[in-house]
């Protein structure tokens, strides 16, 4: 078969893979297509963490037609037991003849192992290169989790064209359009956790829930509140009311003491995580991220501010993408009006760029700019 034929099917498999965007972590995005006598008889993708793998979904769709078929998969099929049985066994069960895959899996349990297992079953397998985007491009969050063992971090802010997060009265609600807000809620549904600082928690009393129709199955994200001091308003919703996603308060030992003294009993929906702090009562962000990953299996986090938190994450270069929703307003300066950042950052005019704009989207009256951190 010519490379262009392989490419056609692999491109279809790739489009399938993208349907699972942001929902599969800590698993990768994977798409698969089953071809028999030049006809596509099945296709599928990995839709969410713990769900059927792409190969299984595609082969079930193909049913009896999968016997003697060619299977195109964007990623090397898994050959180990995880939440699902090994795909190599499933491929064998359905009687596939040839398997074509584009990238090796990075996970050491599966890396470069599929061919060995498939060969035992008498199935041919081929690693092919049809020129699709690399694994690190379309599976960036997965690659980060596997290689760095850290969650994928998305910062998200709604601001004016002059870079202000709130007006002279300190109000940050209704800066952006409804279209931007719906987009933000969809972003929330795509991550494992949402994180905010204590001032945003105290001032805005946010719900951090998902108030937009979401077509796919998702788990309610954890809600993480950062506070060195433990000075949180106890009457606020996330503390007072049981939540769909668990609330995690990341604090210091003294912060925990201060909190628990006032709370008397920690509500069942809240976990308090303590960390040793630096002299300024700040917890090193990496320590928090490692704990969230290892203890709660949090693989992606949407950081929703405020300014101090944005500053801290940006200064430490601790983000992968920044979603900036710009409304065509100007707040100027004065009063409680605050900028996106509270301190001078290292970036300087004339120096090489550290960030790259990867997307701009018009959302009603607003513009969404998505930045990728390249440091
Ligand atoms: N337009 C928008 O998109 C948007 C989004 C969010 C917020 N806002 C606005 O932003 C304002 C709040 O921003 P802000 O800069 O004042 O505060 P903030 O960033 O919300 O919270 C800062 C606080 O978070 C805690 N914190 C941050 N990093 C920490 C670390 N590494 N370790 C421990 N604790 C840490 C500290 O709490 P402790 O002091 O308790 O130790 C710190 O004082 C509000 O007016 C809000 O409405 C706007």
Image (cartoon, helix red, strand yellow):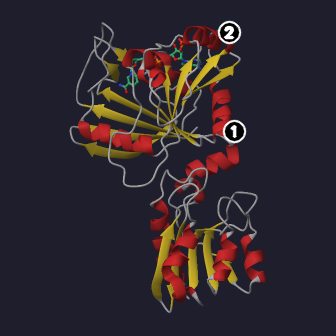
Question: Camera-side residue: 155 or 234?
Answer: 234
Q: Marks 2/1: CA distance?
A: 26 Å
The residue carrying mark 1 is 294
Mark nearer the N terminus (2 vs 1): 2
Q: Is residue 82 left or right of residue 220?
A: right
Q: Which residue is mark 2?
A: 279
Disc 1 packing (10 Å; few <14; some 14–19; many ≥20)? some
Residue 129 occupies which quadrant of the picture? Answer: bottom right
Image position of 55 with respect to 41: above or below: above
Q: Which secondary structure, mark 2?
A: loop
Q: Tell me: residue 75, above or below residue 267.
A: below
122 sits left or right of 329 in the view: right
Give the quarter of the figure containing the C terminus. top right
Q: From what the image shows, is residue 167 above or below residue 137?
A: above
Residue appearing at x 37%, y 54% in the figure:
215
Q: Residue at x 57, y 72 (%)?
A: 56
């Amino acid at each position: 078969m010519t490379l262009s034929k392989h490419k056609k099917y692999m491109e279809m498999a790739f489009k399938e893979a993208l349907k699972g965007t942001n929902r599969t972590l800590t698993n990768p995005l994977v798409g698969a297509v089953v071809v028999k006598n030049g006809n596509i008889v099945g296709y599928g993708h990995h839709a969410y963490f713990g769900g059927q793998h792409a190969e299984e979904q595609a082969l079930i769709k193909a049913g009896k037609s999968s016997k003697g078929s060619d299977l195109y998969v964007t990623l090397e099929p898994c050959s180990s037991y995880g939440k699902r049985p090994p795909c190599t066994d499933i491929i064998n069960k359905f009687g596939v003849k040839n398997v074509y895959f584009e990238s090796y899996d990075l996970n050491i349990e599966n890396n470069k192992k599929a061919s060995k297992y498939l060969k035992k079953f008498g199935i041919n397998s081929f690693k092919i290169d049809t020129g699709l985007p690399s694994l690190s491009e379309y599976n960036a969050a997965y690659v980060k989790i596997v290689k760095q063992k850290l969650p994928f971090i998305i910062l998200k802010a709604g601001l004016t064209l002059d870079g202000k997060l709130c007006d002279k009265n300190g109000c940050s609600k209704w800066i952006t359009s409804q279209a931007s807000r719906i987009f933000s809620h969809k972003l929330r549904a795509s991550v494992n956790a949402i994180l905010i600082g204590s001032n945003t928690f105290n001032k805005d009393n946010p719900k951090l829930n998902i108030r937009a129709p979401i077509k796919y199955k998702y788990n309610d994200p954890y809600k993480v509140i950062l506070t060195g001091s433990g000075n949180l308003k106890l009457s606020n919703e996330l503390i007072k009311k049981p939540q769909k996603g668990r609330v995690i308060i990341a604090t210091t030992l003294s912060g925990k003491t201060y909190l628990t003294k006032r709370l008397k009993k920690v509500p069942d929906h809240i976990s308090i995580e303590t960390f040793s702090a630096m002299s300024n009562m700040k917890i090193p962000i990496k320590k928090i991220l490692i704990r969230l990953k290892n203890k709660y299996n949090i693989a992606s986090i949407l950081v929703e501010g405020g300014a101090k938190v944005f500053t801290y994450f940006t200064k430490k270069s601790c983000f992968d993408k920044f979603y900036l929703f710009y409304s065509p307003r100007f707040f100027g300066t004065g009063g409680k009006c605050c900028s996106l950042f509270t301190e001078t950052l290292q970036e300087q005019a004339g120096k090489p760029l550290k960030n790259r704009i990867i997307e701009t989207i018009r959302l009603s009256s607003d513009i969404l700019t998505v930045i990728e951190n390249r440091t």
